[in-house]
Image: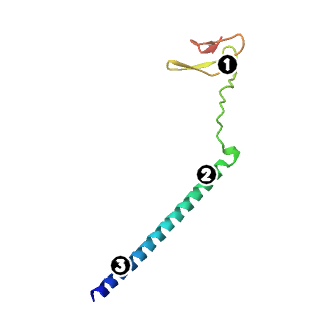
Amino acid sequence: MDSVRAAVYLSVFLSLLCVCRGQMSLDTRLRVQEEQDINRDLAEALDELLDGDQANRISVEKKASVIPRCDVGERCAMKHGPRIGRLCDCTRGTACNTFFLRCY
């Protein structure tokens, strides 16, 4: 009688263990599938961003190399506290006066 009862308890325990393990693996499979879907969506979005329209690209080239020319008497610099910022480049034969901030 005790051996039958032990066999019943053992079979119930093993069946519950198998059912619970099956549910856990199903949950983990769903999580893995969701993560794969998210990764695929992110990869597609990144690919679109990188291969996007060339007009939307940000230019990293410096455009400070093109400085306009100033005539004699025009304002060529600006003072910001102790610093002097150049507005334009004086024509040949003249120089930017740092006191008057004009081409002379």
Amino acid type, mark 1: Asp
State which tag comes first along the sequence, 2 or 3.
Answer: 3
Q: Position of residue 27 (x, y in %)?
A: 47, 69
Comparing marks 2 and 1, which lies closer to the viewer? 2
**Distance of mark 2 from mark 1, alpha carbons?**
44 Å
Comparing marks 1 and 3, which lies closer to the viewer? 3
Please tell me whether mark 1 sits on a helix, a strand or a loop: strand
Q: Which mark is residue 13?
A: 3
Question: Circle 2 sits on which residue?
Answer: 46
Residue toward you, 66 or 57: 57
Question: Circle 1 sits on which residue?
Answer: 89
State which tag comes first along the sequence, 1 or 3.
Answer: 3
- How many circles with numbers are drawn on the protein? 3
Residue toward you, 79 or 49: 49
Amino acid type, mark 2: Leu
Residue ranking furthest to the right: 92
Q: Position of residue 59 (x, y in %)?
A: 66, 37
**Distance of mark 1 from mark 3, alpha carbons?**
90 Å
Q: Position of residue 5 (x, y in %)?
A: 30, 86
Amino acid type, mark 3: Phe
Quadrant for the N terminus in the image: bottom left
Residue 6, picture quadrant:
bottom left
**Distance of mark 2 from mark 3, alpha carbons?**
49 Å
